[in-house]
Image (tube, rainbow, N blue to C red):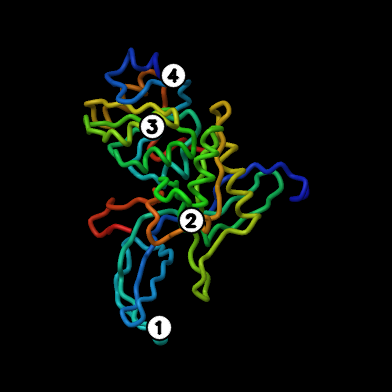
């Protein structure tokens, strides 16, 4: 499934430029060290973190998009950084738990701390 | 397959969660950092030779080694403190110049910060470590044309005033303090 296809099925809104890419799975964590350790190319990263570190870590492992849950606001400089590295930031009012549940029902497996090896 | 001819396929092994602890000697102002593999950052004052070290800051991080699944080579990265991304704060900084020119080709430069050597000098990765780290991150990339370039941290012109984004987890625990 691609990001654009997922957007049509789940309540998530792009806050930065939309880069439509294939989704390979995902991880839910608020730790950048978890992403460096287990993040995979094409993953969705589900988090409440809105720090600029999120973009630097996501870019390092080629995360496809970041989903900020609980409707948290993201600063303009973070959105600009995401545009630069072609990673889309989404906002959803859902909790991480609810978002992962909905995407799981659509066949996208989002693991706590990343994909099992 | 020998390590020299192997096209390595690296995976992380021996990943350890812990803290980067920053301490300062209140006599001579010596600052040092080390990795602590504990559930909470150690904050005790202690004496070591002529120094009296006090806790300054802690940041959650991981420490790991790389293992080649094809030839069995293990590259220890125990001296790697953190990976950082340049924020272009100093125009003439070598890391900034390399980062900016590399970005034009979709090459994203990061710096590898290391713990100081036992004699207090700035630490750095050796060529084997740098090569393995670059191969490990680039092997994960799927985006067409995109590359990651990990450079030695000593490319920073002014570490004390560098505004780089350091990839550690800060403020995630009640007892966690800013690095």
Residue that carries the numbered disc 4 in the rendered image:
A20
Q: Secondary structure at mark 2?
A: loop
Camera-side mark, 4 or 2: 2
Residue that carries the numbered disc 3 in the rendered image:
A82
Q: CA distance from mark 3 to mark 1?
A: 45 Å
Q: CA distance from mark 4 to mark 3?
A: 14 Å
Q: Chain of mark 2?
A: B
Quarter-of-image position of residue B129: bottom right
Q: Secondary structure at mark 1?
A: strand
Q: Secondary structure at mark 3?
A: helix
Query: In this rendering, is residue B57 above or below B30?
Result: above
Q: Chain of mark 3?
A: A
Q: Extreme front residue here? A: B92
Residue that carries the numbered disc 1 in the rendered image:
B48
Q: Chain of mark 4?
A: A
**x and y percent of residue B166 in the render?**
40, 51
Kindly check if marks 1 and 2 are in contact, taking CB atoms under 8 A apart as contact: no
Residue that carries the numbered disc 2 in the rendered image:
B156
Q: CA distance from mark 4 to mark 2?
A: 35 Å
Camera-side mark, 4 or 3: 3
Q: CA distance from mark 1 to mark 2?
A: 30 Å
Q: In the image, is A108 to the left or to the right of B13?
A: left
Mark 1 Cα-neighbour bin, 10 Å: few <14, some 14–19, many ≥20? few
First in sequence, mark 4 or 3: give its number: 4
Quarter-of-image position of residue B9: top right
Q: In the image, is A23 to the left or to the right of A102?
A: right
Q: Secondary structure at mark 4?
A: loop
**x and y percent of residue A23 in the render?**
45, 23
Kindly check if marks 3 and 1 are in contact, taking CB atoms under 8 A apart as contact: no
Q: Chain of mark 1?
A: B
């Amino acid at each position: 499934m691609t990001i654009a296809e997922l957007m049509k099925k789940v309540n998530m809104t792009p806050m930065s430029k939309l880069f439509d890419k294939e989704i390979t799975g995902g991880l839910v964590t608020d730790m950048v060290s978890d992403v460096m350790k287990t993040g995979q190319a094409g993953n969705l990263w589900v988090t409440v973190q809105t720090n600029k570190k999120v973009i630097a870590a996501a870019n390092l492992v080629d995360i496809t998009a970041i989903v900020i849950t609980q409707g948290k606001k993201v600063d303009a400089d973070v959105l600009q950084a995401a545009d630069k590295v072609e990673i889309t930031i989404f906002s959803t009012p859902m909790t991480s738990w609810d978002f992962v549940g909905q995407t799981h029902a659509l066949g996208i497996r989002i693991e706590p701390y990343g994909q099992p090896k | 397959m020998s390590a020299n001819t192997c096209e390595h396929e690296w995976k992380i092994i021996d990943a350890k969660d812990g803290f980067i602890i920053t301490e300062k000697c209140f006599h001579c102002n010596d600052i040092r950092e080390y990795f602590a593999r504990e559930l909470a950052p150690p904050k005790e004052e202690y004496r070591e030779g002529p120094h009296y070290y006090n806790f300054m800051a802690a940041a959650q991080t991981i420490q790991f080694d790389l293992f080649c699944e094809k030839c069995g080579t293990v590259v220890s990265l125990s001296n790697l403190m953190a990976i950082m991304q340049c924020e272009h704060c100093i125009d003439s900084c070598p890391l900034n110049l390399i980062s900016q020119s590399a970005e034009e080709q979709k090459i994203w430069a990061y710096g590898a910060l290391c713990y100081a050597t036992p004699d207090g000098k700035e630490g750095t990765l050796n060529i084997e470590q740098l090569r393995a780290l670059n191969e490990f991150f680039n092997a994960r990339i799927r985006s067409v044309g995109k590359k990651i370039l990990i450079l030695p941290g000593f490319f920073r012109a002014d570490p004390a005033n560098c505004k780089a984004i350091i990839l550690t987890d800060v403020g995630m625990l009640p007892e966690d303090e800013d690095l």
